[in-house]
Image (tube, rainbow, N blue to C red):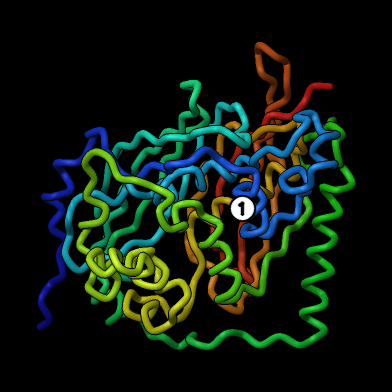
């Protein structure tokens, strides 16, 4: 009879409700940081990279998309949900809830993060047996003391060896696509891009329940596209951040193959940058993906969240604003797969003070097999006229 696998969470308890330290970005946001982000998230909205177009907008200049907020910190906003040492574990993103207050992030802004582990629960899963779902909060504050947003990220922590034992690895090869299929994907992407270019600087008005958002197609995903995403996060730039205060994220109990080499990093920072060596190497190196129970290279939960926020804001236009989003992640994007984003307005209420309509949008993210990758609701403020 095999020994029962358990999770010892006693070290996690000491961190719940305690203000945390962690990484902070050193430099103000640069306009090219915003451009790089739009490129990495495959979001060709000219408001975020084209000077003449942005100059004609209500903002008068290039601003950061709301999704960029998760780029303006260290650790995707997930670090407060990865506290306490549990040896032999790894983590996956389980979801993000956002409360957005504004103002928009602009070039020159200095953003800092305040963090706290909110709560956790242990559940039995088919994927890895005993699995901890922990939630942590990151509050994003600019140089004027204004709270831009608060993110409550869910981290899924599990015993890597147990996940590896349970994984069948029958899906280790990328799907193959014909030239005709690839051409169709590209045409559907262009149709989606035209949907927000056609809106341009105008206001989205007269939205009612039942209104369907245009479908967004992303992919096929590749090691190259995942690497481009990773390198658009400012924290991945050598020397871009510093550590302050107490946090146990780096000592979470990562398996040796997924740990950073801090001593080696003093000579070559690649030894601790996460992608070449560290917890994120499984995203782009299949041999390490299989060590943690994944069949092959897979995408980032934070990027999935960014795709959703971009999807909502592109539809809402520059006069709209996502005030709240609560998304649950069920499966990552794997190399070779194609992702589809669909949304539908399920309700419209009106702000008591401004009279602005607040549209509730149900978002579904699926792969090409129609398997759900993420699902949830968002509230989007639209202009009244």
Pinpoint residue 27: horizontal percent, then vertical percent: 48, 41
**Rendered-image quadrant of the C terminus:** top right
Pinpoint residue 312: horizontal percent, then vertical percent: 68, 44
Which residue does the image show at 27% across and 46% down from the upper left? 120
Relative vertical location of residue 120 with respect to residue 209 in this rendering, above or below: below
- Quadrant of res 354: top right
- The reply, left or right, for residue 329 in relation to residue 263 is right
Which residue does the image show at 38% across and 63% down from the upper left? 273
Which residue does the image show at 10% across and 76% down from the upper left? 3
* Residue 204 seen in the figure: no
- Residue farthest toward the right in the current orientation of the protein: 198
Pinpoint residue 52: horizontal percent, then vertical percent: 84, 41
* Residue 324 seen in the figure: yes
- The reply, left or right, for residue 276 in relation to residue 50 is left
From the viewer's side, name the closer residue of 281 and 133: 281
- Quadrant of res 260: bottom left
Pinpoint residue 104: horizontal percent, then vertical percent: 62, 31
Tag 1 residue: 37
From the viewer's side, name the closer residue of 101 and 372: 101
- The reply, left or right, for residue 273 in relation to residue 253 is right
């Amino acid at each position: 009879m095999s020994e029962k696998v358990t999770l010892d969470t006693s070290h996690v308890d000491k961190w719940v409700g305690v203000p945390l330290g962690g990484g902070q970005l050193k430099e103000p946001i640069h306009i090219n940081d915003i451009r790089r982000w739009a490129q990495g998230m495959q979001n060709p909205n000219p408001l975020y990279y084209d000077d003449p177009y942005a100059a004609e907008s209500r903002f008068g200049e290039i601003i950061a998309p709301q999704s960029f907020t998760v780029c303006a910190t260290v650790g995707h906003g997930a670090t407060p949900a990865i506290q306490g040492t549990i040896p032999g574990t790894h983590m996956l993103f389980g979801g993000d809830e956002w409360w957005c207050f504004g103002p928009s992030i602009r070039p020159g802004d200095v953003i800092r993060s305040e963090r706290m582990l909110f709560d956790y629960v242990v559940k039995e899963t088919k994927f890895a047996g005993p699995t901890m779902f922990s939630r942590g909060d990151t509050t994003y504050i600019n140089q004027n003391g204004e709270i831009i947003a608060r993110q409550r990220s869910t981290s899924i922590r599990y015993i890597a060896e147990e996940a590896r034992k349970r994984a069948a690895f029958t899906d280790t090869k990328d799907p193959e696509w014909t030239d005709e299929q690839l051409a169709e994907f590209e045409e559907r992407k262009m149709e989606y891009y035209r949907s927000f270019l056609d809106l341009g600087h105008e206001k989205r008005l007269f939205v009612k329940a039942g209104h369907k958002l245009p479908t967004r197609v992303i992919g096929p995903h590749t090691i190259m596209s995942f690497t481009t995403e990773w390198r658009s996060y400012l924290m991945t730039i050598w020397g871009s951040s510093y550590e302050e205060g107490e946090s146990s994220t780096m000592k979470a109990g990562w398996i040796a193959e997924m740990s950073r080499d801090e001593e080696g990093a003093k000579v070559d920072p690649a030894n601790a940058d996460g992608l070449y060596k560290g917890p994120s190497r499984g995203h782009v190196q299949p041999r390490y993906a299989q060590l943690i129970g994944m069949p092959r290279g897979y995408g980032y939960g934070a990027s999935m969240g960014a795709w959703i926020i971009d999807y909502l804001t592109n539809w809402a236009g520059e006069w709209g604003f996502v005030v709240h989003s609560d998304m649950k992640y069920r499966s990552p994007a794997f190399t070779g797969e194609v992702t589809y984003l669909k949304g539908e307005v399920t309700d419209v209420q009106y702000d008591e003070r401004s009279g602005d309509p607040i549209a509730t949008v149900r978002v579904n993210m699926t792969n090409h097999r129609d398997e759900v990758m993420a699902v949830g609701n968002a509230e989007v403020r639209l202009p009244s006229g």
